[in-house]
Amino acid sequence: MFPFPRSLVWPPPPSQQPMPPLLPVPDSATDPGRSYPKRHRSPSPPLSAVGPSRNQYHHRFATHSQNRRWINPDLKRRRLSSLKRQRRWIEAENAPDFSSSKGDPIVMMSYNILGDHNCRNHTELYDRIPAKFTEWESRKRLIFLEITERNPDIVCLQEVDQVQDVLDYMKGRGYDGIHKGRSGDYKDGCATFWKKTRFRLLEDDSIDFSTFNLNNNVAQVLVLEVQEGRQLVVGNIHVLFSPRRGDIKLGQIRMLLERANFLSRKWGDIPIILAGDFNSTPRSVLYEFLSSKEIDVSLHNRLKMSGMDPMDFVRWRREYIWTEEELLNAIGHLEGTKIKSPIKLWSSYASIKGPSITRGPNDEPLATTCHSKFRGTVDYLWYSAEIACLRVLDTLPIHLLKERGGLPSEEIGSDHLALVAEFAFVDYESSESDDEDTKSTDSSGVSTEHTALSGSY
């Protein structure tokens, strides 16, 4: 009956589809033998209940999630990477030949462990740090673990006030050591330890700066004999923090260098390693002095010598008037205003080039300490001639420290990073005797090769 095949027009459009037949409405009159229940309309809900909560789909899942706090996935905190795994050893690229040197290398650690008294009384520095990370019982476990993992031969600690805890642990690990506390109301001090199976203490000449009117900070200067028969001067210092007292800071560093130089000459010009928290940045005048550059204090304001303020590195274009007291504090005399270090020193970290993510323009670390008020480098390991740095344990990238709001953290027990370097004695005399026939000698009888080597380290 269709003009076209059924397959071309079937099914018809919805408008042309036939309506399904309506079910007959049961009627008791037509079906008296069947009874039907009465239908009752549900009562309308109150207006307060009308809304999404009445949605059947919502109710189906509400019981599962109504007690769970909703978290925005975009704001969810990223899982932080391990800090300790980021610290890697960096080898010296042009290390000299140590085939003629005596003994094994010496691993040295310098670590400001953050005194318990200072941590509890300067909470403004750690306002972004969870309280559990600033408690001594938690921090000391991490500090001791750091020392154990690095296994240094010599350990120089600063801000040591829980003395008995530290002494007990270090002695239990096979170290001998000496603690030098600050005078007055301060509780902390410096402590130097060495492995008793390898070193022997020959002399201790510690400094209490309060006896020289240079605040009550302390420093330690020791002479240690290595079992192989070599001697070494080891210095440990915590310089005054106050950024505005550049005269006292310079005076404390000057005295440490003078005392170390005196002991070195006393024991036959033995090498020197100086460790500590120097509370001065790599861009500061104090750093220039430590790196054996002559400075003229009259060209610098004592308020701007430590580099701990962003404007401290700006050079003054006029002379700054120093009082007699300030000159005596800084350079120890009133005969002129120039001063130069009595020792030629090199910074262990600056002497080994590292990645730009952890190093600054002069190859010093970008940061060795980080808290709410300051982030930068103030800790160093300095060394003199007749010894060379083989490798250093690199510091951390700045962004990792920022992620945690500073230090201490769940992995690091102090607001400073431990500096670790490996040193070796350089035996120039042996190398000279081996090549005596091939060396040239100048008119003064001094080997020109020896002079070149001495000036290259």
Image (tube, grey):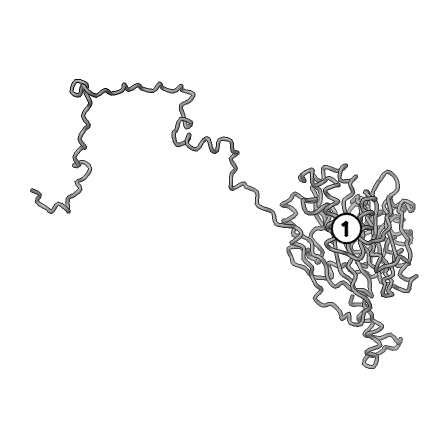
For residue 17, side relative to residue 130 (left or right) = left
Locate residue 288: give its quadrant.
Answer: bottom right
Is residue 455 positioned above or below 152 on the image? below
Residue at 85% across / 45% down in the picture?
Answer: 217
Q: Is residue 251 visible?
A: no
Estimate the x, y position of residue 454 in percent, counting from the top left.
Answer: 81, 68
Is residue 25 positioned above or below 121 on the image? above
Locate residue 213: give its quadrant.
Answer: top right
Estimate the x, y position of residue 291 in percent, counting from the top left.
Answer: 79, 58
Q: Is residue 52 visible?
A: yes
Residue at 17% across / 40% down in the picture?
Answer: 12
Estimate the x, y position of residue 335 in percent, counting from the top left.
Answer: 91, 54
For residue 229, side relative to residue 307 (left or right) = right
Work out whether residue 218 or residue 226 is closer to the camera in this orientation and state it.
226
| Residue beneath disc 1 | 111
Please identify the quadrant where the N terminus is shown: top left
